[in-house]
Image (spheres, grey):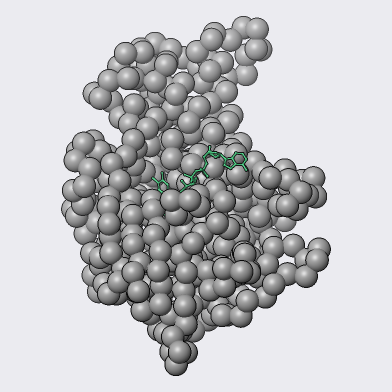
Amino acid sequence: MIDFEIPTPIERQMQLLGMLGEQVMRPIARYYDEHEGERPWEYINMIWQTVRAQGGRTLAAGDEKSSSGEKKPRIGNLIMVHTVEALSWGDAGLYLSTPGGALGGAAVEATGTPEQKERFLKRFGEGEPKWGAMAMTEPQAGSDTASIRTNARLTDDGKYWILNGEKIFVTSGLMAAKESPGFVVVWATIDPTAGRAGMKPFVVESGTPGMTVAKLEHKHGIRASDTAAIVFQDCRIPFDNILGSAEVARPTAGEGAPKGFKGAMKTFDATRPAVAAGALGITRATLEFTAKYLKDRGVKVRYGVPLHQQTAIERDLLHMEAQHRASWLLVLRAAAKMDAGEENTLEASMCKVKAGAVANAVAQKAVELLGPEGYSCKLLVEKWMRDARINDIYEGTGQINRLVVARRLLGYSSKELR
Ligand SMILES: Cc1cc2nc3c(=O)[nH]c(=O)nc-3n(C[C@H](O)[C@H](O)[C@H](O)COP(=O)(O)OP(=O)(O)OC[C@H]3O[C@@H](n4cnc5c(N)ncnc54)[C@H](O)[C@@H]3O)c2cc1C
């Protein structure tokens, strides 16, 4: 049985994050939307201090022990999705600027050895704020991740990897590559003849010579967060920074995804529920605001009346609420399966598709229901509509995640259904 109940200390943490969202993030959300390129240091420092006061972790994860020493079920991913939802409710762009391992940390968690997890992840909670980022996308390789050209070559003495290539649209790429003692997990091929089997993740520490932030994107939404293009030119990193094994295991006929690519899929299984939770935060913010705005203007939603007696607005709001609830349940299921150590590829893609589509639909509808005020910059609703859009693009677009869902449900391989 899956128990979605949140233990009391975590509920208290969510209340704290709710206050942070309301009192720190919301008041500065518009400023950083309008001043893209300025880093929100007041928020970053505030959240970093809060995290450190709580023991130096952005998220509690892993096994927990009760006072009697008995092992309690893992709930780290359940906590993670609640945390991301709560912070995105405050502001999605600022949430993406929150120090922590982020997608880079998830990639290390999914593909690293125990020693690498200790080496690279322990730092998030010590000293100054730090960021992790993950760089997969390239100018010619977005949805088709197997087309990446960034390559890693082993030096003759076998001690170093030399990375060459270009990555684009890296969330927090500037912070992770340049501004903090963080890292970027870079996906590169070590054997272009091996296709997806040759794809491997590498940790490139910030400030490594040969890694250059070439450009920052000017964006439609989540403008408080930096999105960078990063160039690797003869970038030399220690051999041990390849996550997992350097072995290229070509799949035999009928074996499914090759090992190298399984690491990428495992990373997406972990990150898609997190991205979906971010979409949920925007959806809840929009829903709560819209319901209150309309209530203050005399629109009362009657629950439980038959469909033919509902007003058009009641019907819209009830539909929005139902879609929001459905998304939440899918996200919780994907996270709970991960905590239980079960494969969650289907659930991760399903919740990402649903939550991304719902965030977009709810925000569009809210702008419509609120009339000209909804479209004006007086309110944050038009911003939430822009912020929602990315959730259907990164970590696999809506179409790509629908393909993953269809393959899993119908039993097709990626070669058979693409
Ligand atoms: C703000 C932002 C932040 C990002 N952050 C990161 C990051 O941190 N790390 C990272 O690696 N990447 C990141 N990305 C990149 C993102 O993951 C890609 O943009 C996304 O995977 C889509 O790739 P693409 O842009 O090349 O589009 P394409 O792959 O060219 O797709 C274009 C359109 O075609 C559709 N399409 C493509 N293939 C198929 C198919 N087989 N069937 C049906 N439809 C298809 C897509 O759904 C899309 O609508 C970010 C992007 C943005 C905008």
Residue 292 percent across, percent down from the top left: 38, 23
Residue 304 percent across, percent down from the top left: 62, 18
Query: For the point 40% across and 64% down, which residue is it?
Result: 165
Q: Horizontal placement of 173 versus 202: left or right?
A: left
Q: Horizontal placement of 327 versus 275: left or right?
A: right
- 66 over 393 or under it: above or below: below
- Foreground residue among 345 and 380: 345
Hey, which residue is sitting farthest bottom in the picture? Answer: 157
Q: Horizontal placement of 167 versus 214: left or right?
A: right
- 243 over 224 or under it: above or below: below
- 196 over 396 or under it: above or below: below
Residue 365 percent across, percent down from the top left: 46, 21
Query: For the point 44% across and 92% down, which residue is it?
Result: 157
Camera sees residue 59: no
- Foreground residue among 258 and 112: 258
Q: Quadrant of residue 336?
A: bottom right
Q: Quadrant of residue 410?
A: top right
Residue 34 percent across, percent down from the top left: 21, 36
Query: For the point 80% across and 50% down, which residue is it?
Result: 411
Give the position of the N terminus as an image quadrant.
bottom right
Give the position of the C terminus as an image quadrant.
top right
- Foreground residue among 240 and 163: 163
